[in-house]
Image (cartoon, rainbow, N blue to C red):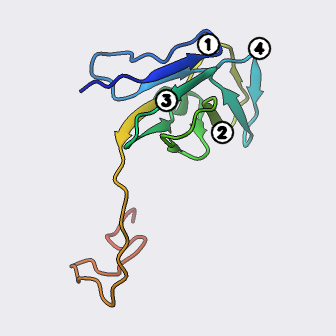
Amino acid sequence: MKREIKIKINGIFIPEYQTPNASGCDLYANIERPIVLKPGEFRIIPTGICIEIPEGYEAQVRPRSGLAAKYGIGILNAPGTIDADYRGEIKVILFNFGKKDVKIKKGDRIAQLVFAPVLRAIFKNVRRLSKTRRNTGGFGHTGGIE
């Protein structure tokens, strides 16, 4: 399914899908000079684009698996949500989880953007919730690494 998204470009990079069935389109670093991310450091990286998301949708900024696997680079608030009424520049909070400095250059693919429908909840206050097999089992309830 395709949906038209209006875009205002304040740089030179337009988001791109790298393959015909890619879920996310790549976002590019729109910076004047390279930025070095030291281990444990985060920086807000501009993309040079603003978009108009249709009502009833959101855009999610997600990490790129290649950056994570090769360099330990992720997104601090992943996935970052962009609401349909936001019109400002999209920026990405990159974090260096790795052990080495990583240089980010203009035009580097730094994140992915995925569009998704949004369900707005109508909350109803009740005395009880229905029981399930899991019920109130929280973190680690179903097991994990031994």
Q: Amino acid at mark 3?
A: Glu
Contact check, label 4 and label 1, Cβ < 8 Å = no
User: In x, y percent, where is residue 131?
Assistant: 23, 83
Residue 93's mark? Answer: none
Q: Earlier in the sequence, mark 3 or mark 2?
A: 3
The residue tagged 3 is: 52
Q: CA distance from mark 3 to mark 2?
A: 27 Å
Q: Considering depth in this image, is 40 or 5 the residue closer to the camera?
A: 5
Q: Secondary structure at mark 1?
A: loop
Label 3 neighbour load within 10 Å: few <14, some 14-19, many 20+: some
Q: Secondary structure at mark 3?
A: strand
Q: Considering depth in this image, is 20 or 115 the residue closer to the camera?
A: 115
Q: Nearer the viewer, mark 3 or mark 2?
A: 3
Query: Is 45 rendered above or below residue 122?
Result: above
Q: Amino acid at mark 4?
A: Glu
User: In x, y percent, where is residue 115?
Assistant: 39, 34
The residue tagged 1 is: 107
Q: Is residue 7 visible?
A: yes
Q: CA distance from mark 4 to mark 1?
A: 10 Å
Q: Considering depth in this image, is 131 or 51 the residue closer to the camera?
A: 51
